[in-house]
Amino acid sequence: MSAERRFGSGLGEGSDPVEAAREAADAAAEGLAGASADLVVVFATPALAREQAVLDEIHGRLSPAHLIGCSTETVMAGARELENQTAIAVWAASLPDAELLSFELRAHPLAGGIGVGGWPDEVGPRPGSPWTVILLADPFSFPTDGLLARVNEESERPPVILGGLASGGHRRGEHRLLFGDRSMSEGAVAVAVAGITVVPVVSQGCAPIGPEMVITAAENSAVRELASTPALEKIEDVMRSLTDDERAVAASGLLAGLV
């Protein structure tokens, strides 16, 4: 019988990087119950993500075999979500039956556009358990859409790629990416997982509203019509159909997605 998988998470608050990292890492360690930290993922608000002391404290407490992370505007752990506060979340996993490979990715100019370097040859089609890649990228310096297109084009059985973009900054150089015991301000960091089943879920940050609608007219990335009606009119119709509480939430921002 294989060893048991264990998971833990913790939240640290406050402007002291060592204290915040210690609080979060110790809570994550409790969930592991003495098992090794094979994978640690860290999300921290920019002020903490820039501090080397944060990574030093996490490594001192958890000794992770693989660590990735990034800066973020909102930090969540357990049942708590903190916005507009200095905080850090640490998620740790003991995965004795998994194969893990962490790597960095960098963008570089090409004659016809932008290329990506650093994708390991090992993370490709494989018999049995496929790879799942957790990818965290800086939106100002890394062409995530280009990478996804390339991976899908070059393989009949591409790996599933999950993850997201660093946030909390407003211009190039303000985001942080965490990799092992180092931090950087551009590119992307990733960990590939095989040997276990990874089930993706959607963040609680969005909820679908209105009916499914076909895009009947568009120009480049601008949607002109939805269901043969001017897009703005259709969205206004949907907004009028919402309850007062739903309308108040929607007023803070809408996202468009594909069904």
Image (cartoon, rainbow, N blue to C red):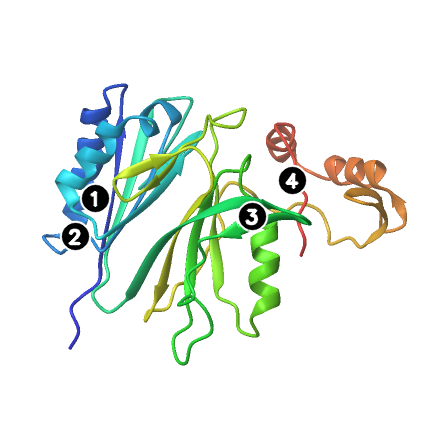
Whether label 2 touches label 1, CB < 8 Å? yes
* Element under disc 3: helix
Rendering coords of residue 7 (x, y %):
24, 53
The residue wearing badge 3 is 144
The residue wearing badge 2 is 32
Left or right: where 55 falls relative to 104: left
The residue wearing badge 1 is 28
* Element under disc 1: helix
The quarter of the picture where residue 29 lies is: top left
Whether label 4 touches label 2, CB < 8 Å? no
Above or below: residue 21 compared with residue 69: above
Q: Quadrant of the N terminus?
A: bottom left
Above or below: residue 220 compared with residue 192: above
> Which amino acid type corresponds to the residue marked 2 in the rendered image?
Leu
Residue 80 seen in this snapshot = no
Left or right: where 224 falls relative to 97: right
The residue wearing badge 4 is 255
Q: Residue at x 15, y 69 (%)?
A: 3
> Which amino acid type corresponds to the residue marked 4 in the rendered image?
Leu
Q: Residue at x 38, y 33 (%)?
A: 75
